[in-house]
Image (cartoon, helix red, strand yellow):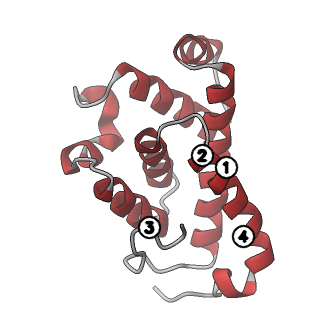
Amino acid sequence: METRLNLFEQGQKAVSTLFGISGYLKKGTIEASLMELINFRISQINNCGYCLDMHSKEALAAGETTQRLFGLSVWRETPYFTQRERVALALAEAVNACDVPDEIYEIAKAEFTEQELIDLTLAVAAINAWNRLNITFSNVPGTYRVGQFG
């Protein structure tokens, strides 16, 4: 794999907007550990190697276990995740598929505040944008360092 375009040099104006969203989310209502799980799971679904590299490193540095990361693609079948995490993952997957059934929304609404629901949805939108940019311009996985982007 070879980088097609250096997004962080040629696309500074464009990515600064996404960095702003990411900064907002880091200070937002959703705990960092749950945010990393969502970013990792959506990046799995979207096949973004760069984002998987980044979010696995960030999650592990923050104390996440390898067992939970390895089991994230089959989270419904494992006992490793809390109810809050399960609801967030179900909502994130539904938002990612652009199909949020009433049943999933109602369960999420019972678990999260309105602001948290907004932040979760924005988190899925943001990681989708990052996934698509990194896939299009072939940012090479393996080069990310923990804390590289603040």
Q: Are marks 3 and 4 in contact (CB under 8 Å)?
A: no
**27 or 71, which lies in front?**
27
Disc number placed over residue 4 in the picture, else none: none
Given the image, on which type of amino acid does mark 1 rest?
Tyr
Q: Are marks 2 and 1 in contact (CB under 8 Å)?
A: yes
Q: Quadrant of residue 120?
A: top right
The residue identified by callout 3 is 49
Residue 81 drawn above or below residue 147:
above
The residue identified by callout 2 is 27
Q: Residue 123: image x %, image y %?
A: 61, 44
Q: Marks 3/4: CA distance?
A: 18 Å
Q: Secondary structure at mark 3?
A: helix
Instruction: Mark 3 vs mark 1: give the one in front.
Output: 1
Q: Quadrant of the N terminus?
A: bottom left
Instruction: Mark 4 vs mark 1: give the one in front.
Output: 1
Q: Marks 2/1: CA distance?
A: 5 Å
Q: Earlier in the sequence, mark 4 or mark 2?
A: 4
The residue identified by callout 4 is 15
Q: Earlier in the sequence, mark 4 or mark 1?
A: 4
The residue identified by callout 1 is 24
Mark 4 crowdedness (10 Å alpha carbons): few <14, some 14-19, many ≥20: some
